[in-house]
Amino acid sequence: MSSTKKSGAKKSTEERRDPIMKWATRVVILALFLAFCGWLDTIKDRWYVFEPSKLHALAQDAIAAHPDDTGAMVHHIVSNLTAEYPSSQIRINPNEREWVFNNAGGAMGGMYIIHASITEYLIVFGTPLGTEGHSGIHTADDYFHILSGEQWAYTLGSFEKEVYTAGSVHLMPRGVRKQYKMHKGCFALEYARGWIPLMLPFGFADAISSTMDYISVYDTVRATGREMIKNLLIGKI
Ligand SMILES: *[C@@H]1O[C@H](CO)[C@@H](O)[C@H](O)[C@H]1NC(C)=O
């Protein structure tokens, strides 16, 4: 009887220590993981190819060369990038007719993926109808170059709207949240740099929870995956 009691007591001490060890191990693993993420974050700029100031100049050139013709602006931009960057350095998607619907943060528009890698993407986004929604909270800096129309934005605490017109750039630094509206006929060249895969859930959430537009999800996954893999194959992360 007494020996049973003894072993029972011993077991309960072990049982009490076990969860502590388990949680200590988990905390250490989490700390190591966070340190690894912190380190990755300090080196991400190694893989950036595009320069925001150059893209801004290019967007302005495209607007000046083809006023009132957004399609021609897009062609101007893609031709310039294809000529400017060797295919050994970066993969540019030359198919200007590969448009997909994008629903995110309650807003809807069409998107053409010019470039997508782990650390950068460059797309044309817009709609002739206009749309409005939440910007999302992103892990990348986002440069929104307006090609045509106007984009309006609202930051909490302000009583005035921010207005971005053709030729201007709306920079949304990492972590910033806004309500935004693409006014009628607004199209933009959007450049994001940072950790792109972490932005993807925002890009798919509306389709999964609301529109159920599996065709757009499939086309977006296919185009993004293809572009990311083609970039990885040439060493562009
Ligand atoms: C591309 O556009 C940039 C910026 O406008 C310009 O400086 C450059 O000369 C252009 N490159 C080509 C190949 O047209």
Image (tube, helix red, strand yellow):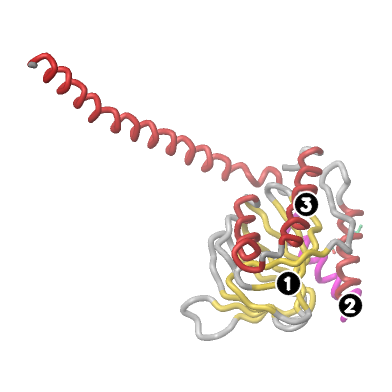
Quarter of the image that includes the N terminus: top left
Query: Callout 2: few (<14), some (14-19), or many (20+) C-alpha neighbours within 10 Å?
Result: few
> In the visual, does 54 lie left or right of 211?
right
Q: Earlier in the sequence, mark 2 or mark 3?
A: 2
x and y percent of residue 180 in the render?
61, 76
Give the residue pinned by disc 3: 222
Asked if disc 2 and disc 1 are in contact, CB closer than 8 Å, the reply is no
x and y percent of residue 127 in the render?
76, 76
Q: Which stretch appears magenta? A: 50-68
Give the residue pinned by disc 1: 109
Q: Residue at x 77, y 69 (%)?
A: 110
Name the image quarter holding residue 75. bottom right
Q: Nearer the viewer, residue 195 or 200?
A: 200
Taking the view exactly as shown, the residue that stands out farthest to the left is 2
x and y percent of residue 64 in the render?
87, 76
Indicate whether residue 71 is drawn in magenta.
Answer: no
- What is the spatial separation of the Cα atoms under label 1 and label 3, in whole angstroms? 18 Å
